[in-house]
Image (cartoon, coloured by chain):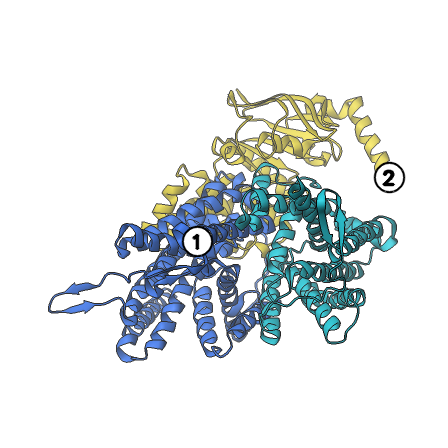
Amino acid sequence: MLKLQVKNLVKNFGGLKAVDNLSFDVEKGDILGLIGPNGAGKTTVFNLITGFLKIDSGKVLFNKRDIANLGPYEINKIGISRTFQIVRIFPKLTVAENVYAGLIGGTKSGCLRILLRSLISKGNIHKNIDQKRSNELLKFVGLLSQKNELAENLPYALCKRLELARALATKPELILLDEPSGGLNTKELEDQILLIKRIYEMGITIVIVEHLMKVIMSICNRIIVVHYGEKIAEGSPEEVSKDKKVTEAYLGSSLIAKNR
Amino acid sequence: MKTSAKRLQHSKLYAEILGIVVLFSIPILIKDEYFIHILIFAGIYIMLALSWNLLAGYAGQLNLGQAAFFGMGAYNAALLTLKVNLSPWLGLLAGGIAAGIFGVALGFPSLRLKGPYLAIVTIGFSETLRLVIMNWVSLTRGPLGLFGIPPLTSINIPYIAEFDFSQEKYCYYIIFLLVLLSIWIVNKLVKSRFGLILTSIREDEVATQSIGINTFKYKLLIFIISAFLAGVAGAFYAYYIRLISPEMLMISVTFTILSMAVIGGIGTIIGPIIGAVVLTFLSEGLRVMPEFRLIVYGLLLVLVILFAPKGLMGLIGSIINLTKRNQKEEKAYAETPGKKFS
Amino acid sequence: MSLLFQETLNGVMVGSIYALIAIGLTVIFGVMDISNFAHGEFLMLGAYVSYLLSTIYQLSFFVSLCLAGLTVGLIGIVLEKLCFHPLMGRSSVGTDTIMLTIGLCMLVENLVQAIWTPTPRMLPDPFKGISIMMPLGVSIGFLRVISFVIAISILVAFQLFLTRNKMGIAINATAQNKKAALLMGVNINKIYSLAFFMSAFTAGVGGTLYSTIYALFPTMGATPTLKAFVITILGGMGSIRGAIFGGFILGITEALGGTYIASGYKDAFGFIILILILLLRPSGLFGRK
């Protein structure tokens, strides 16, 4: 079953083509990897899908529904969650409260309803939040024992997991992970890969943006290679790693990087 | 463990009841009208500082137009009572509502603007409103201001008491109730799911949107609520002082409100209350030279920002923490993730 | 017709002073991300220094003007070291600096009020009675013409400094990208001090020129500062050229609007334009991004 369809997506920044006529499909149950050298436009694709950037032309369909003109919060409401390249947690809130926010975002109640409920309900916030689910989520990412700590005191790797827990709290059908490996050491990376596999086992479709080949190769069932905003290859990890264009793009960019 | 928490809760409740009883009996015990007058002013400032703090401290919306909400409430209440004989009691509500509507106007720019941009635009709205009031002489009498505003209508309960609200001591009870109500509302708001979303907007608005929250609606609502509270305070001010002028919309009024909240401790409930009370009494102590009031506010504000960014509350908190320092320091510790999930 | 000409000329002259005030504000914002609500106090101090020097010490207009700029510039450096520098590493630096400048604004303004009373004073006009005849029977006071020339020369010098001088280019680079500038070996502390000096210097001069039109009093800084904010936002915060254009646009709009629309709302025109533009074009007319 088709979950997400991206059709002829185009985005320009001034004269620069960040995304150029990009199309791909995501099937339900996929772990799709979106790879490419730095500056290939991968994060831009995420920002376009999740409504943080306006699409210049093209279409994005989710469950066959056109979502091109929806705002970020509406996109989340219909079942697409995301994480960010540079972690975005709420530093001055506790770990548990970060997850609470996700749980509130995941409910159907609108802002006015929450306001009125807040005024008439007795007791503190802990009583009005599904504690069981919050604890489950925290346990799932391994943060249960730190739940009352301020998020700003967590080391980076744990911030990434917290962000993941918050994204999962909104009950997504599809989750977009922007560089889940970024800033992690080898041990942390292994944990992170394990965690992503677990999310996959929960039946959530996943799209990953990465430039670390290792991560993509070990998790994804399908890979799309983007270069200068264009799709240059698509297929299983084995197929893609043998593709000539791909090695050229990667080799070329690493040569440039060395010469700098 | 649980019993000590409960005991703490109980003793907190007792302290609150005791505090309310003491504050309630002040006008009976102390006959000094001037003292009561200062207390009333402290009450007005508490409402203003609390309402500003909702926006700036909790939602992270740096509004510099709080004086406009105050003025909007006062002018609307006074005009409705003077021109169409609206009962001052309803005028309190009408002032709040009028300010709330103006709050929508100030909240709309927050859709797109943040930080310094929002600050300037809110000043812009506030100054524009002040100029309108200054220039619309046929309605507002311009710089002369409105006078002859009647006090809150007296309530006569036969054989028991007569509450004449042209007297300070009775007005004290009204502002006392209004302040209690404001504290109750603010407390409910910030300690609930609504408040949690407000703080997450302050911490990271993009992330808040990414988890399915229409942040604009929240911001708009908190602008309206904040404006409403400040508007009610303004309306009360009009019926208490019974003489209002465009000076109550000056930027210095917003700055005063801001100083109180920041010096007391921004982003807390008790902070703005303490700040408002301390600064009001301090300024009365400095009555000899009115300029000294703002000099002291400014100096305190600078010192607080430089040396105690969490305000007086933060200072008290860190002193308490110092005494508790011996407690073990826990290091963030990572468990293996992905163990179980049902 | 002559009224239109007269008012346009007035607008251009006031606009040049607005521009002078605004570049100081925008340079601090560009380099340090500080919205300086105490900028008006630099103006006011500059005007008072000029006034004191030219009345008590009988110094000439130009000498007192220069000394005022230098004095206020030094005050700027001291303030930067004492108050702003300690805040630069904080996560809440944006709001903290706004609150700090608001505190400074209240403190300085009322301190001056306590010392010199709120009475408005007039800077002695060294060219009293001299005016220049223009076409259409319009005449303009010589002091205004001189003010205009001074303002324009400083604006030009400012722009040249930022584009030709090594330190100026470093300032520009810091405003564009702080991290990159640090990597290129720019001494950021020196840049901050210099930026504050330039901002306060132009404000000191601008304040003196402003007071030749509107008199000087302790709260005189508030209105032009708000206008300077409007101008910097219109021109895109951090953009020098934007600030200069914005200054002239606001000066002319106010002069014409005040004459032909409503004089009581003269000070509100800027805000109204600002609100409209921000809703339509958030990065300003000449925005960087």
**B146 horizontally vs A216: left or right:** left
Disc assigned to residue A19? none
**B237 horizontally vs B58: left or right:** left
Residue A187 rendering spot, x and y as whole percentages: 67, 47
Residue at (28%, 53%) from the top-left corner?
B90
Disc assigned to residue B69? 1
Q: Quadrant of the C terminus of chain B?
A: top left
Q: Amino acid at mark 1?
A: Phe
Q: Quadrant of the N terminus of chain B?
A: bottom left
Q: Colour in which chain C is shown?
A: cyan
Residue at (40%, 69%) from the top-left corner?
B42
What residue sits right under mark 2 in the picture?
Answer: A258
Question: Of residues A112 and A166, which is closer to you in this image?
Answer: A112
Q: How far is the residue under mark 1 from the one under mark 2?
A: 59 Å
Give above or below for B65 relative to A164. Answer: below
Residue C82 rendering spot, x and y as whole percentages: 70, 69
Dot in front, 1 or 2:
1
Question: Quarter of the image holding residue B150?
Answer: bottom left
Residue C23 rendering spot, x and y as whole percentages: 72, 52
Residue at (47%, 75%) from the top-left corner?
B282
Q: Amino acid at mark 2?
A: Lys
Question: Of residues B263 and C268, which is closer to you in this image?
Answer: C268
**A95 horizontally vs C210: left or right:** left
Q: Which chain is disc 2 placed on?
A: A
Secondary structure of the residue carrying numbered label 2: helix
Give above or below for C201 relative to A35. Answer: below
Question: Of residues A103 and B77, which is closer to you in this image?
Answer: B77
Q: Colour in which chain B is shown?
A: blue
Q: Is residue B307 visible?
A: no
